[in-house]
Image (cartoon, coloured by chain):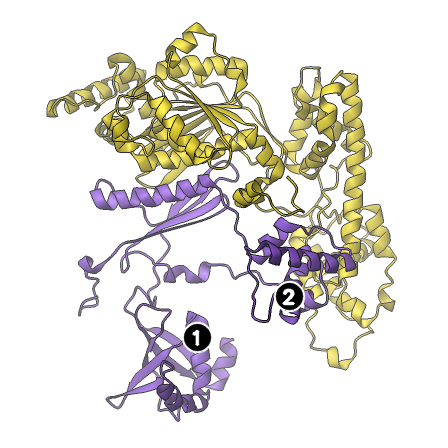
Amino acid sequence: MSKSSIPGTKQIQYDRQLRLWGDHGQKALESGRVCLIGANALGTEILKSLVLPGLGSFTIIDHQLVTIDDCGSNFFVHPSMIDQSRARVTCELLTQLNPDVHGIYIDKPSIDDLLQQNTFDFSQFNVVITANLSINTLNILAHHLWILKIPLLVARTYGFIGTIRLQVFEHYVIEVHPDDTIPDLRLDRPLITFANYCNSIDFKSLTREEHLHLPSIIILFKTLQLWQEQYNSKSLPQTRSEKDEFRKILEQLLHHSAYDIHDKEKLLENFEEAKRTIPSRLVKTNIPSTIKDLFQDRSCLELSDQTNIFWFVIHAIKLFTENEGQGLLPVRGEVPDMITNTNSYIKILKIYQEQATKDCEIVNKYFFDLLQKYNRLPDECIIACDLVETYCKNAAFLRVLRTTAINSENYLIDETESNLSWYTCLHLCDLFYEKFRRYPGEFLSDETQFETDLIDLKQINRKSVSGKDLTSDNKQQILEELCRYGASELHSIAAFIGGCCAQEAIKLITHQYVPIDNTLIYNGIEQSINVFKL
Amino acid sequence: YDENNQVVPTSIIPLIDGGTEGFKGNARVIMHGYTSCIECTLDLFPPQVNFPQCTIANNPRLPEHCVEWVTSILWPKEKPFGPDVNIDGDSIEHIQWIVEHATKRANEHNITGINFRFTQGVVKRVIPAVASTNAVIASICATEVFKLATSSVLLMNNYTMFNDIEGIYMLTYPPEKREDCPICSNVPVRVQINETAKFQELVDQLIEKYQLIAPLICTQIDGKSKTLYMTSTKQMLELTKPHLRMTLQELGLANGIELLVGDPARASSMRVIISLTSSMETITAK
């Protein structure tokens, strides 16, 4: 799909999201395969936000039949469908949302039996998502997927509370798209071509026009050179007095013989811009600690023919920084707009772009050499071209995400008053389910049942918290509220978690934007969110 | 509001409002009189990005400048599809024409990066969107309505910002209610103006500050109501137009006088109190 010709129907249809993740992101999404376990309101809401943007294919696993309860909370089932296969019905309606998406369903055997038989191939999927899956089945599935190294998103809604847990062995984020970045201009470690260009400008013989349109970056560089000369320094002004001296020198450059009396009160916009941008331009250029950590990571240092391509590129960039880069990452090649004439801006832009291209070529060479060394060449040749360029452009932001396995979650004693209490109390509800095969407050036969359930729930709480009795008032209230919910599914809460979960899946499939690490708890009462790293 | 300047609870119609942009979104629950309203926080909205004219005309540097040049300078000059045909962002032919000419200009200046999608984005001021963010913000609004209808739990207090660019982040807080908010409070707004100013200046100031379209301004002088400015009928326009050229003094507007300002852009009239400053004060206030 190219951007230059007239847009095809798909490009028009997906126009709004193409501007967020690009054609290559869309391509990745359209090859994506997702497995959903649980075709309840939450499950269908998750799939909805994946089907609409054009997910490649999905598989629904759900052995249950549509009940009247389902109709109360799920947009995708209708009373006329009661007693039909829930998986089939929702699969049909979801594929109607987007005919380009391929959907299949499995309504027998159940997920429990599938796991027991161990013949189903989960590794065909990019992501597996569960929606309100019971704890026993979840533990088995989570373990299985951890071994297979397939990412798992566990979504849950319970009354006004919602949670998402991401379990992933190793995930790479190549395009982070950070909200706000400092441009990579390197005034303290200037590009040779940039320094030469600046030095070629004879400041004293500038015409009035030229002075008026002098790019702010050149003004700052010139000032820096003068400051460094005057104070015999090779670095940037750091202390208050050094910065004041810097500004004084800048002020002096404002005055120029090319101006006459009429220009006395003139506000020089380019100089104003220079002053304004000092904090973001006059910064020390270095390699972010996150990237240094990547360079030291075992996977980077111990490459093999099994290692993911990501680490090969990281290693190639590392070699670059140790040699031609002289301790710095490849140049990003972007220059922010500044007040100046066209020629000056384009000239500066070209300087940085050419350096970025040069740096990228060197990284590419290291990359190919590594691939050759570890016998990876035949498969990877085709994708390599664009790939290295994307990595280099985003070199300062590359990320690796590794979460803990769900099974190793130790139920921490929660001393805080935050939303984490809801999560730990939900776990108590799970323990209740393990014992009684239903959730507290579910299927109430009469008034007294609620009281009994609540007492049982509190009993479980006391048993699980060894030693101290940590039932604060807050926790007591939470337990009571959860009992009141009786594992009910509110559609709007399902929609919230559905939207969030779908976007996390898209992040995992496209390797763009950073996913949560690793547990999200949504409180629909206060409309607040906490993300914890469990 | 009742005679004691207290909010009448039964008169409140809750307003639930939400919006999205790419991976960001917000939602709010407004109970006029109790919580802050949209007007209270209006000045927190950032101004629209507009490129300066001299950049568009003389010093283009970015591909956006070239596109803007075509839409704001070349199109009105050449009118390629007819004398009264304005740019239609959804018309493929229009966009193609703009792409062609913007590319020409870009090539003259060694600027790259223009293509169909980019151009359409600039012309239509396209805001990117995804299904997931819309689902999230819509669900927050729906949850709040559900809470209102069922009185099951407390409502959100009262403004939420959502962002899932990096991880997922949501902040809910109650922005402060402006004591003199022209919409939700019953307190008149105070406007400062130089005592020697003409009425035109006051009208311009009000139009700019409150984004009015065609204000109707009246007041009470010596117990009698007087229409100072009205444009809805030709007759009234003719009658009140001369007022614009008169000074505030000539019109009988003393310091502290209260005006009533109505406008098609506002559901209810604003009470505005004039505060006259001498020349010295106005300069230091700037």
Q: Which mark is residue B80?
A: 2
Q: What residue do we see at 21% from left, 42% from top?
A: B150
Q: Is residue A224 visible?
A: no
Secondary structure beneath dot 1 equals: helix
N-terminal of the pair, mark 1 or mark 2, is 2
Q: What residue do we see at 54% from left, 20% from top?
A: A169
Q: Quadrant of residue B155?
A: top left
Mark 1 or 2, closer to the camera: 2
Q: Quadrant of the N terminus of chain A?
A: top right
Front residue of B8/A389: it is: A389
Extreme top residue here?
A: A117
> On what subunit does the disc labeled 1 rest?
B
Left or right of B263 on screen, residue A98: right
Q: Which chain is yellow?
A: A
Q: Position of residue A111 (x, y in %)?
A: 39, 14
How crowded pointer 1 is (Cα within 10 Å; few <14, some 14-19, many 20+) is rated as some
Does B206 appear above or below A235?
below
Which amino acid type is marked by label 2?
Pro
